[in-house]
Amino acid sequence: MILVMRRSATPEQVQAAVDRIQALGCQAHLSAGEERTIIGVIGDRRQLDEGVFDLLEGVEQVVRILKPYKLAGRDFHPLDTVVPLREDAIGGHPVVIIAGPCVVESRAQILETAWAVKEAGASVLRGGAYKPRTSPYSFQGLGEEGLELLAEASAVTGMALVTEVMAPEQVPLVSACADVLQVGTRNMQNYNLLHAVGEAGKPVLLKRGMMSTMEELLMSAEYVLSHNNPHVILCERGIRTFETYTRNTLDLSAIPVLKQLTHLPIVVDPSHAAGNWEWVTPLSMAAVAAGADGLLIEVHPHPDQALSDGPQSLRPDHFAQLVTRVRAVAQAVGRDL
């Protein structure tokens, strides 16, 4: 349920509505626009009577929301959310490029990659310290040592850092060095983890599950948002279909659909969708043309030697070419990098 306040509503009337909502055992979420304020009511709707709010001074309209996701929807929050990241932000006018290796392998590798992607035009560094793998015998990451190396690379380059957290008990440690906590595709519906990252108060990059619907993605985002953490970034990374030529099928239609359903920014991971570095650039261009707010690109100085996802990782020179082509598309649709 949402309360649409009148344009003439005073701050005292808005606060009175909030007090009334809380007195009924519900939560109130304010969204102040340029013309009017909207108050979201979170609670058991079966116990709420619309007439209680109709009588409040300053309330113009009471609207019930039928969608299961409330905080993630545009009904509660009509304006786009912009997630701040040091000197940058995701969700505003510029398209943000997040780049780096799939996983940290050594100090030399992460520092070389970090400087290369920054010079080419990336503004956010990505890299895995903890890496979920299909096989238990594959390289799982360096753990705490990897976090320390990522923190060093972030510090010396000045780039914000995105890295994955896999379990609730890892959240404090990862939060100490990362600007953004990434929840991977396999953990999109790990509700204990979603609660933990929501409570951490850090921006969260939430990847769509490989077999999840857009509504399920938004419901997972709702878990994070329910902890008064408004900084959620959605990530489309391809879904599993019957096609075998690509690693996953990039759902480009998810970008405009989610833009209509939610105020949250959307980034695209073409590396995991393609599975082949040669297809990453055209998919990146298509994603920006469709309205993506950012790209998540895997880059490795020596992909043939990579311990994880080498075939889909771009060399630094190929990444620089990608940035040039993506910039042209961004400018063509009225944006920039």
Image (tube, rainbow, N blue to C red):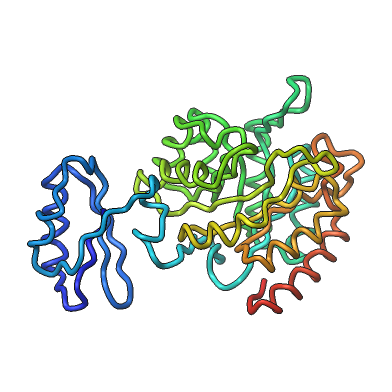
Measured from the top left, where is residue 5 in percent x and y? Answer: 20, 68
Measured from the top left, where is residue 108 in percent x and y? Answer: 81, 45
Q: Residue furthest top?
A: 136
Question: Looking at the image, which is closer to me, 64 or 313?
Answer: 64
Quarter holding residue 240 = top right
Measured from the top left, where is residue 107 in percent x and y? Answer: 76, 42
Q: Residue at x 32, y 53 (%)?
A: 65
Name above or below for residue 302 compared with residue 317: above
Name above or below for residue 81 compared with residue 308: below
Question: Looking at the image, which is closer to me, 207 or 260?
Answer: 260
Name above or below for residue 196 compared with residue 35: above
Q: Residue at x 24, y 43 (%)?
A: 43
Quadrant where the C terminus sits is: bottom right
Would residue 12 be found to the left or right of residue 43 on screen? left
Question: Looking at the image, which is closer to me, 22 or 49?
Answer: 49
Q: Residue at x 54, y 44 (%)?
A: 181
How many marks can you see?
0
Measured from the top left, where is residue 274 in percent x and y? Answer: 79, 48
Q: Residue at x 31, y 63 (%)?
A: 31
Would residue 234 be found to the left or right of residue 19 on screen? right
